[in-house]
Image (tube, rainbow, N blue to C red):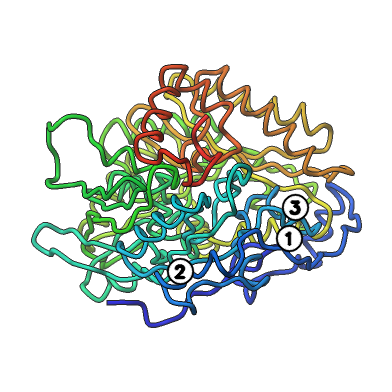
């Protein structure tokens, strides 16, 4: 079973559906001018990728494997498969820098064709970058080219089938090229849902969710994506992997975890078997006000450790709350908006009512003020729209980017303060640093930071300095370098510090065994 609608291609220099791109309204332009000033930005440059390194004689082998129509070498397609969608990626694209463009875009259909492409790449010394939805924000699609005859993008867009549904065990097997909405639509035909809704949901793929250990906005209720995976298959240059013979086992280390989070460096995931649930009969979202970020965070910890988490729970700090609620009429107002918490509930009507009542008792008892459903529904309506706003702000000379981390509850206050201070110090006076708790666990939480600053003459260097300062602060505080954005190339120096010398050697050994010639996403993940 395959989706009925074609995949929407993202703009090479912007996020998301080109038809959904937004301009800042006049009221928002006034706020931007007040905070950062408005400045002219260079016009977007529509440049061509560099000349191909791979000639038609070499590509003939690929055409025999997947069909001539599925090996694309035109400039437009190559540009669409260049890098991901981080702010640095877009800044480079907007100046016409397409140096990381692949020589060809190859679209296999099925495990056998993927394996055959990898064998071809080994034979000819060609680097291969697996491509799902292209939503990466950590440099995971900017592979190293030196030492290789060329580089191809292994575009999994043809592998978009729902292969199997087991309604007794409540599992489904999906191909990696399915985008989030496509997978949900196919599952809905069986009355099921995956429940995985990261901000990239509308464009990210099932394979990408697995390869980066994605975490969605409903993780409190449905879990992280890696927790949903019960089995997978992968093609590697040295042979196939077929993992997941049972829901749990004690048969040595869990080899599924070698592929989950491997970012295409160990193998190409060709199918994923996931735990699914019945589609919810009722969904509701609401808002709460807390007097402080600390008070709201403590309440989240209480819920998590009491086993009373709603499906969705997130908490904005004072600065993010103020920005969320800002409008021209409120400028200069003295009322403290506090900190906004969003809670959401999904399930059968009785389950939603019972869980909502229990959570309400806890939150009101701890001092929260209920704000009703309007803030929650407003958040749900715009939950996937922030990257479009980022692009509109870039158009007006405002540097906007995000980063995230995670730590244990006892270390949350230190991590929050240290990362915020590092970003403010690097970006300077007038910058904004916003934060929210995005995911919670019994033992800790994830902190998600958004920054905005007036662009300098070199915004790429400006962000790289701020990112390094924040990353140094994360590692110094004993936190992880990434909770759900993955390692890519951007996080490699700090990833090496996080896992230590022995950990690095373990990853290099796995890479050498599964990909001895190093063709798979070279330069990504492995320090």
- Please give the name of the residue rendered at 63% of the width and 66% of the height, measured from the top-left corner: 78
The disc label shown at residue 178, or none: none
Please state the horizontal and vertical placement of residue 503, each as a whole percent of the image. 41, 22
Residue lying at 83% horizontally and 46% vertically, measured from the top left: 455
Tell me the residue at 54%/58% (across/down).
152
Find disc 2 in the rendering and name its residue. 107
Please, what secondary structure does the residue beneath circle 2 have? loop
Left or right: where 342 falls relative to 227: right
Between 316 and 50, the one lying in front of the other is 50
Residue at the limit of the structure toward the bottom, as seen here: 4
Neighbor class of circle 1 (other Cα within 10 Å; few <14, some 14-19, many 20+) is some
Taking the image as shown, residue 124 lies to the left or right of residue 158, namely right
Mark 1 vs mark 3, CA separation in Å: 14 Å
Point out the image quarter for the N terminus: bottom left
**Label pair 2/3, CB-CB below 8 angstroms:** no
Q: In the rendering, at what x and y percent does residue 52 appear?
A: 67, 62
Q: Nearer the viewer, residue 17 or 36?
A: 17
Mark 1 or mark 2: whose residue is earlier in sequence? 1
Q: CA distance from mark 2 to mark 3?
A: 26 Å
The residue beneath circle 1 is: 50
Which of the two discs, 1 and 3, labels the residue nearer the N terminus? Answer: 1
Q: Specify few, some or many for label 3: CA neighbours under 10 Å numbering under 14, 14-19, or 20 or more.
A: some
Q: Position of residue 29 (x, y in %)?
A: 82, 61
Which residue is identified by label 3?
92
At a point 34% along the width and 48% down the height, the residue shown is: 236
Above or below for 201 versus 245: below
Q: Secondary structure at mark 3?
A: helix
């Amino acid at each position: 079973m395959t989706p009925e609608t074609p995949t929407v291609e993202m703009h090479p220099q912007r996020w998301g559906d080109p038809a959904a791109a937004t301009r800042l309204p006049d009221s928002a332009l006034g706020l931007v001018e007040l905070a950062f000033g408005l400045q002219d930005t260079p016009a977007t440059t529509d440049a061509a990728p560099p000349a191909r390194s791979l000639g038609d004689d070499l590509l003939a082998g690929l055409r025999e494997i997947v069909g001539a129509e599925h090996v694309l070498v035109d400039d437009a397609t190559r540009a669409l498969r260049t890098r991901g969608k981080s702010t640095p990626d877009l800044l480079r694209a907007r100046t016409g820098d397409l140096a990381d463009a692949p020589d060809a875009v190859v679209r296999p259909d099925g495990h056998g064709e993927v394996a055959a492409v990898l064998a071809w790449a080994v034979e000819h010394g060609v680097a291969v970058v697996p491509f799902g939805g292209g939503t990466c924000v950590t440099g995971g699609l900017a592979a190293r080219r030196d030492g290789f005859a060329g580089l191809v993008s292994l575009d999994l867009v043809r592998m978009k089938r729902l292969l199997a549904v087991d309604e007794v065990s409540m599992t489904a097997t999906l191909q990696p090229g399915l985008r989030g909405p496509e997978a949900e639509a196919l599952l809905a035909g069986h009355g099921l849902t995956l429940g995985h809704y990261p901000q990239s949901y509308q464009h990210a793929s099932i394979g990408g969710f697995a390869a980066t250990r994605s975490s969605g906005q409903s993780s409190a209720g449905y879990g992280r994506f890696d927790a949903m995976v019960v089995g997978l298959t992968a093609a590697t240059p040295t042979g196939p992997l077929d993992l997941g013979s049972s829901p749990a086992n004690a048969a040595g280390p869990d080899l599924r975890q070698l592929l989950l989070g491997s970012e295409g460096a160990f193998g190409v995931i060709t199918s994923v078997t996931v735990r699914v649930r019945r589609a919810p009969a009722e969904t509701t979202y609401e808002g709460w006000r807390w007097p402080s970020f600390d008070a709201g965070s403590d309440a989240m910890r209480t819920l998590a450790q009491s086993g009373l988490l709603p499906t969705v729970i997130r908490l904005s700090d004072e600065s993010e709350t103020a920005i969320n609620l800002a409008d021209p009429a409120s400028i200069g107002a003295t009322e403290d908006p506090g900190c906004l918490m969003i809670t959401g509930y999904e399930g059968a009507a009785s389950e939603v009512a019972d869980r909502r009542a229990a959570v309400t008792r806890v939150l009101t008892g701890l001092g929260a003020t209920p704000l009703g459903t309007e803030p929650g529904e407003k958040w749900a309506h715009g939950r996937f729209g922030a990257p479009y706003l980022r692009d509109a702000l870039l158009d007006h000379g405002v540097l906007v980017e995000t980063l995230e981390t995670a730590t244990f509850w006892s270390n949350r206050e230190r991590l929050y303060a240290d990362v915020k201070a590092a970003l403010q110090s690097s970006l300077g006076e007038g910058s904004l640093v916003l934060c929210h708790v995005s995911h919670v666990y019994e033992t800790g939480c994830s902190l998600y930071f958004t920054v905005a600053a007036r662009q300098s003459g070199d915004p790429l260097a400006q962000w790289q300095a701020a990112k390094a300062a924040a990353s140094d602060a994360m590692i110094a505080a004993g936190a992880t370098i990434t909770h759900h954005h993955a390692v890519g190339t951007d996080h490699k120096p700090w990833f090496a510090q996080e896992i230590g010398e022995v950990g690095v050697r373990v990853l290099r050994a796995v890479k050498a065994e599964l990909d001895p010639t190093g063709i798979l996403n070279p330069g990504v993940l492995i320090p």
